[in-house]
Amino acid sequence: MSTSVTVFTCDMCDFKASGKIVWGRFYYQLSGSSLIPLERELGWCSSCKTLVPVERLSINNAIYDEIQSQKVDLTRYEAELLNLENRSFFIKRLMSSKKKEEIKKNIAYTQRVLKEKLELVNILSSRKTPPRCLICSSDEVISYKFPSISDDEPPEKRYLTGFIHPDCGGNIMISNSGIRLMIKMKSRAYSTEGVLIKEWYE
Ligand SMILES: [Zn+2]
Ligand SMILES: [Zn+2]
């Protein structure tokens, strides 16, 4: 799968940054070395002096909504499985076992996501330090909700993001680079206080 690359520029200087910086997989690593996906957003790092992925530490409603919806899914799959097991005597064995496997896979997946989300809430609620830059670990970061841009926009069209370039005062603009790239996913694991432990390609 290829993804189009977003570009950030400044209307007052030659600043340029790529939206590619937030690509990849980011995890918290727990003591048992299990990996919990963390939430990130694009922000400004005063130490990197550019746009970087920044940890999102707020336990927002979206996390609780997701936990709730995973719980609902889990209940539904378990009921389906029970239903199938009760009926399996009457329907073709092969069909039943295939369907059963599928439901069991769904249950395992849902349980895993649910566990990860609950673990994330745990990590975030006991977090001591402020959000960090996921590139250099500095906590001198400004989080900002940058707008997204549609893949169809031509590269010459630049839009205001509303973010002011620190130390420069210019407007940070967003546009499409017109370049599509195949993603080679980099994975990074951090301590639960947001300090980089290791990075690797999967
Ligand atoms: Zn600037
Ligand atoms: Zn940084």
Image (cartoon, grey):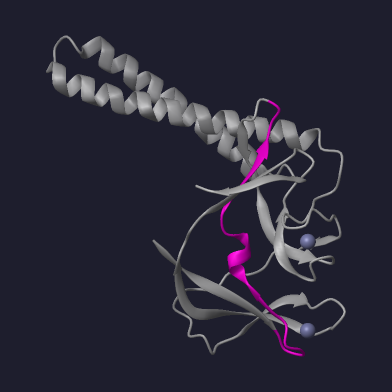
Position in image of residue 104 (x %, y %): 36, 23
User: Quarter for ligand 2?
Assistant: bottom right
Between 126 and 159, the residue placed more toward the observer is: 126
- The N terminus, quarter of image: bottom left
Q: Please report the bounds of the magenta region as a residue range.
A: 10-31
* Front one among 15 and 104: 15
Q: Position of residue 95 (x, y in %)?
A: 16, 23
Q: Residue at x 77, y 90 (%)?
A: 12
In this view of the protein, which residue sits in the foreground, 63 or 169? 169
Within the image, what quadrant is residue 35 found in? top right
Height in image: 160 above or below 62?
below
Residue 124 image offset from top left, x and y in percent: 75, 38
- Let me know if residue 25 is in the magenta part: yes
- Confirm whether residue 144 shows in the render: no
Q: Is residue 78 above or below residue 18?
A: above
Q: Is residue 79 above or below residue 141?
A: above
Q: Quadrant of residue 7?
A: bottom right
Is residue 122 a member of the stretch shown in magenta?
Answer: no
Q: Position of residue 197 (x, y in %)?
A: 71, 43
Q: Is residue 29 visible?
A: yes
